[in-house]
Image (cartoon, rainbow, N blue to C red):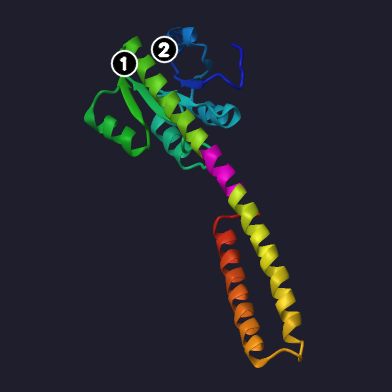
Amino acid sequence: MTNTTEQVKILIVDDDTATGIILEGYLRPYNYYIHIVDNGEKALEWAEKIKPDLILLDIMMPGISGFEVCERLKNEKTSQYIPVLFITSLSDPYSHKKAIESGAEGFIVKPFNADLIIAYVKLFARMKKDHDNAEQCLDSIKKIVGSSIRDLANVNFAVSGNLEMALLNHDQSENSYKYIKKALYSLKKGNKMLHKLRNKMSFE
């Protein structure tokens, strides 16, 4: 298995070795990077290590269940947007409901169909890619806006300083004095608004 930054990364979690091999066989022709683990603890460990684009997750496993794995993934900032597809022998409505409540995006009952697995994988991989692209765009926008806010704040600070100096000049008329004082007040108010906006959007 060769890993490149362009490959879709899939984490398969199942204590049944045969199931992992079958799933890998379905997905190998699509050049996905695939890593297989056999329990929930390893799933959490490798989700943190490789940051997969999709997790195919069994429910009934030794140690922590797939439900708990999914819940813990969805509660972590670094993994909450990774799509989780449950692949399980459990077919009862309660298990399906619990899967939804744990945050999973899909639920397939064994024995599974290869075409359905592939369709889900393609869909969720595309969803994760779209989300990552949106996050990158948002980060770029934040940087641009943050830089603009800093520049504007610097200009306002410089102008405010000049106005402060002008107020110390006693040769100006009364009207000019009032105008400068009003402009200075507006600039200071604008600076406070920029500061609040910058803090709200976490620009550093």
Question: Quick check: is 142 in the magenta stretch?
Answer: yes
Element class at badge 2: helix
Q: Are marks 2 and 1 in contact (CB under 8 Å)?
A: yes
Q: Is residue 176 left or right of residue 17?
A: right
**Quadrant of the image occupied by residue 176:** bottom right
Q: Nearer the viewer, residue 25 or 14?
A: 25
161 versus 30 height, above or below: below
The quarter in which the C terminus is drawn is bottom right
Residue linked to disc 1: 110
Q: Which mark is residue 193?
A: none
Q: Residue at x 72, y 89 (%)?
A: 172
Q: Is residue 45 left or right of residue 108?
A: right
Which is more N-terminal, label 1 or label 2?
2
Question: Quick check: is 21 in the magenta stretch?
Answer: no
Q: Nearer the viewer, residue 111 or 182?
A: 182
User: Is residue 175 at all visible to an observer of this figure?
Assistant: yes
> Residue flagged by tag 1: what amino acid is it?
Lys
Query: Farthest residue toward the left?
Result: 93
Q: Nearer the viewer, residue 174 or 134?
A: 174
User: Is residue 59 at all visible to an observer of this figure?
Assistant: no
Q: Which residues are magenta?
A: 135-143
Q: Residue at x 73, y 75 (%)?
A: 161
Residue linked to disc 2: 19
Q: Is residue 23 left or right of residue 136?
A: left
In the rendered image, residue 131, in percent from the top left (x then y), is placed at 47, 35
